[in-house]
Image (cartoon, rainbow, N blue to C red):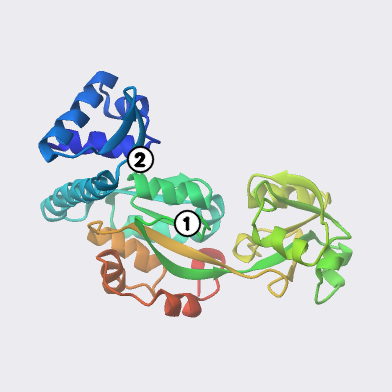
Amino acid sequence: MNLLQLRAICEVANHGLKITTAAETLHKSQPGISRLIREIEEELGVRIFQRRKNKIEAITEPGREIVRIAERALREIINLKLVGQEYSTQDAGELTVATTHTQARYSLPGVIEDFTRKFPNVHVTLRQGNPIQCCELVESGGADLAISTETREQFPQLVCLPAYRVTRCVVARLGHPILKKGRLTLKTLSRYPIITFDTAFSSGSVLNEAFAGAGIRPRIILSAVDADVSKAYVERGLGIAILARNAIDPAKDHELGTVDAEHLFPSSLLNVSIRKFAYLRGYMTALIAAFAPHLPASLVRKAVEGADVDLSSLKRAAPPLKVGVQQ
């Protein structure tokens, strides 16, 4: 049994049972991947994959357990390399953070700036995506950690630590009548054209559920790709926007006013997500502590190593997120 065989069965399992995709990922031929799988099946004496006319259709029951152990073994190999790097290069290396546009633009700049001063020999990469994409990147090994709002999709290979509560506000151009309404209602919001993210009103979203629950259909006139684009059109007077409060910077958004909407839409949790049993280099826990001081390295390590951590208490204690996470 060798590492390439383990990687072959894991890649096939994690890419929809497609040998073609696994072969491309590992830079091998399809027959080569099939041979690696057959070899490890013969050595273990069990079928990992169920086949029909040489096509893989499913993972067998013992195969699921074998893939799970193989993934853990591969993670531990990576951890061994990281331990060596930790003590041979000290505070030098690479750190990839998967995050959303809003967090990359508003929450993280100050944190990253301080981090690069303290760890000048660490190369930081930000990879942006929606919350599901961020978690997928961490789960696949494409990123070391994710900073993104919670998702309804489950990621059993990740530890998701609640860091902050993201609350929402209504944003309008100065002089807009909604800024004088005081405590808003969903019915009031529905009277005005709304500019929103392209996914904000997708099925199951917080905003969509709030309006649907009240039996109100909002007037969506434009879907934008991020908070900055939404604000640009709000500034032109095309409509109002419902945005995360930390996406509003009073020092820069001079032409905009806000009204609290926390009572209309439940807050979302902003999580720090890490692969289970990952080896945490010192500078990685330092970045997490800089972003969320209430998540100390000792707690993060316990959670990643599988110790019992009271996530419910962390959720209840999560403070509201502000611009630049200045609490």
Badge 2 is on which residue?
14
Residue at coordinates 50% horizontally, 64% vertically from top-left?
270
Instruction: Give whichever of 119, 201 is nearer the camera.
Output: 201
Instruction: Give whichever of 220, 281 is nearer the camera.
Output: 220
| Residue 29 in sight | no
Instruction: Give whichever of 223, 307 is nearer the camera.
Output: 307
For badge 1, the amino acid type reads Pro
Distance CA(mark 1)–CA(mark 2): 34 Å
Q: Report x, y in % for residue 203.
A: 66, 52
Q: Report x, y in % for residue 228.
A: 65, 50
Left or right, 154 with reference to 165: left
Left or right, 17 with reference to 132: left
Residue at coordinates 23% horizontally, 61% vertically from top-left?
282
Determine which quarter of the picture holds residue 37.
top left
Q: Are marks 1 and 2 in contact (CB under 8 Å)?
A: no
Badge 1 is on which residue?
109
